[in-house]
Image (cartoon, helix red, strand yellow):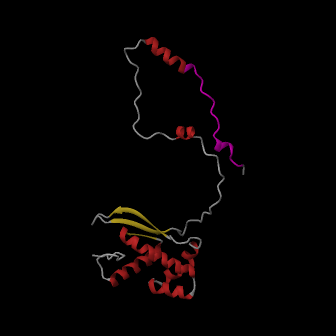
Amino acid sequence: MRHRLAGRQFGRNSSHRKALFRNLVTSLLEHGHIETTEAKAKEIRGIADKMITLGKKGDLNAKRMAFSYIQSRDVVAKLFSEIAPRSAERNGGYTRVIKSRVRLGDSASMAIIELVDKEGAPKAKKEAAPVAAAPAPAEVAAEKPKRGRKKKEEAPVEAAPAETVAKAEAPAESETPAPEAESPAEEKKPEA
């Protein structure tokens, strides 16, 4: 029984497992995203976050520690010059795992692991959005369609006399629709 033993073995001995993780982390930092099995993606997530944290430290010892794990000098240089500065404002959580598909050969669940702060994506600064008044519940109910089956329109009962049907339809035609009021969000828009 494997009580209190963390980590996945992946059917490999420890040196093979370490080499696998080193290769996956190196590829992730080199390309920005990779597709692998969901279990492997979850396992390397913490290791990749530790490497990015080393890059954020930026001192010589951190660079040596990164060289001892990452297998490419170019990737270490990219980590310290590009990836770490992009993640400077973020406190952990530098990677995300997205479930993608099921592999055809063995039905393994695949996932894409990627860096949260991507290369080409511009940093969006969080600006304080103006607080608008919440719309009235009646407006929300009118805008949002109800889920479920659509009801069929009821046909007029054939047994009813034609005069009662004409009287029921007449007031609906004579009524004029009420003028539409502007929503509170449109009234309070700030002018630029």
Looking at the picture, how far across and down is residue 9, in whole percent?
32, 77
Say which residue appears at 65% left-offset and 51% top-offset.
131
In screen coordinates, is 43 left or right of 130? Answer: left
Say which residue appears at 41% left-offset and 20% top-offset.
156
In screen coordinates, is 4 left or right of 69? Answer: left
Say which residue appears at 44% left-offset and 72% top-offset.
45
In screen coordinates, is 183 left or right of 44? Answer: right
The quadrant in which residue 162 appears is top left
Count of numbered tags: 0
Give whichever of 174, 148 is nearer the camera: 148
Q: Main secondary structure of the magenta part?
A: loop
Looking at the picture, how far across and down is residue 171, in whole percent?
54, 18
- Return the residue found at the far right: 191
Looking at the picture, how far across and down is residue 46, in whole percent?
45, 74
Give above or below for 173 relative to 102: above
The N terminus - image quarter:
bottom left
Give above or below for 93 relative to 51: above
In screen coordinates, is 187 left or right of 93? Answer: right
Looking at the picture, how far across and down is residue 61, in whole percent?
54, 88
Q: What's the magenta region? A: 173-190
Is residue 69 within the magenta segment?
no
Say which residue appears at 27% left-offset and 66% top-offset.
106
